[in-house]
Amino acid sequence: MPLSDYYKIKYAILKTLFDNKEQGRKAPREMIGSERFRITESYWLDILSDLLNDGTITGLMIRKCKDTRAVSGLDDIEITGAGIDYLHDNSKMRQAYEFFKNAKDIFPLIMG
């Protein structure tokens, strides 16, 4: 899986959590689960661990057990203020990318 997919999945999980938070409900498990992204559960847990360690989600606990990991609180997972900031910052970066991409199409000689 390309590295860019990591960021897309991370963004999609946070966006789903935020959209559901705005509606006053919890995100359905199937909307944030590994099956949605067609990735292994291990890789999905890596991403959730990163989100948890980054402080962008809360309510979740991941514990290492012998050869696997145990997850609890999946139904209580929520986006944090830092997670909302992440979405906002990435939205601005996406807008800037689109602007420069379009500018390059309009001004091919100037933009290289």
Image: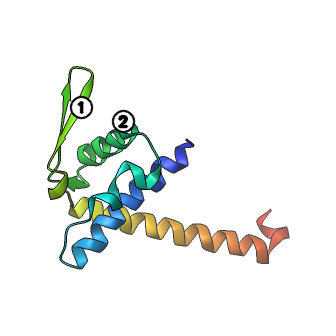
Where 74 falls versus 105 (above or below)?
A: above
| Amino acid marked by disc 2 | Ser
Percent of width and height locating residue 13: 35, 58
- Residue lying farthest top? 66
Can you give x and y, in whole percent of width and height, for residue 96 in the image?
56, 70
Q: What residue do we see at 21% from left, 20% from top?
A: 66
User: In the rendered view of the protein, which quadrant contains the N terminus?
Assistant: top right
- The location of residue 64, given as percent across then percent down, is 20, 28
Circle 1 crowding by C-alpha within 10 Å: few under 14, some 14–19, many from 20 = few
Upstream in sequence: badge 1 or badge 2? 2
Mark 1 residue type: Arg
What is the crowding at mark 2: few (fewer than 14 residues within 10 Å), some, or many (at least 20)? few
Percent of width and height locating residue 85: 31, 64
Give the colouring mode of the picture: rainbow
Q: Secondary structure at mark 2?
A: helix
Q: Which residue is mark 1?
A: 69
Classify residue 63 as left or right of residue 33: left
Residue shown at 39% from the left, 53% from the top: 10
User: In this view of the protein, which residue sits in the foreground, 17 or 99?
Assistant: 17
Q: Mark 1 to mark 2: distance in Å?
A: 8 Å
Which residue position holds label 2? 42
Q: Which mark is residue 101?
A: none
Q: Which quadrant: the C terminus?
A: bottom right
- Quadrant of the image occupied by residue 53: top left
42 versus 107 height, above or below: above
Please tell me in which quadrant of the rendered image residue 63 appears.
top left
User: Vertical placement of 51 versus 84: above or below?
Assistant: above
Give yes or no for contact between labels 1 and 2 (Cβ–Cβ under 8 Å).
yes
Q: Is residue 83 left or right of residue 103?
A: left
Residue plotted at (25% across, 65% down): 27
